[in-house]
Image (cartoon, rainbow, N blue to C red):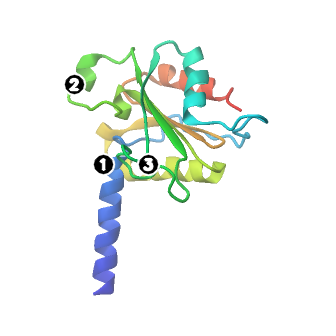
Amino acid sequence: MNKTLASAALATALLTGLTACSNGTSNSGSGSSQKPSATASKPLTASTAFASISGKISSAKLSGTVTAENDPNHLLGRPNQYTSKVTFTDSRIKAADVAGTEKGDVERGGAIEVFGSPADAAARAKYIQAVTKAMPALTEYDYVNGTVVIRVSHYLTPAQAASYKTAAAHLS
């Protein structure tokens, strides 16, 4: 009976993670760097990371700041999970492609999640990729830079998505 309950709990956790990932990922363009993610005077947050990235990518516009109260994943501030998160749109994505999606969904542009350690960030990206690997409709580009995970819509071309990786390389 314990084995059945454990299997049911695992299946529920995977299904919840799949739906809560703001529509998944693929390992397309995934990369990682172990750079420090905080300046000497101010720790890096999802908001400051987005400000830096959007300064280099004019088509990116902030669409929301995730709080513990509105986090669809229920991960903000939890052990080994992100400490801050924002969502953004990208004007290069056609409105028709994202009809029926909700504000904050990765398909509309992306999300930036910041973690307490590079290992936690890498684990999150790996988890998203594992959960959605067999579901092409839920794919996304994920870029890891130190404690930051940048999740980018699959509606962008590989070159467009790579611009986020390039912009993220300047975070520190």
Whether residue 134 can be seen here: no
Above/below status of 167 relative to 65: above
The image position of residue 35, as x and y in percent, is 73, 39
Looking at the rendered structure, the number of numbered marks drawn on it comes to 3
| Front one among 152 and 102 | 102
Question: Which label's residue is closer to the chain start, 3 or 2?
Answer: 2
The kind of residue on which mark 3 rests is Ile
Mark closer to the observer (3, 2) = 2
Residue under numbered circle 2 = 99
Q: Residue furthest front?
A: 69
Instruction: Give the CA distance from mark 1 to mark 3.
Output: 11 Å
| Residue pictured at 50% horizontal, 57% vertical | 78
- Quadrant assignment for the C terminus: top right
Mark closer to the observer (1, 3) = 1
Q: Which mark is residue 128?
A: 3
Q: Secondary structure at mark 2?
A: loop
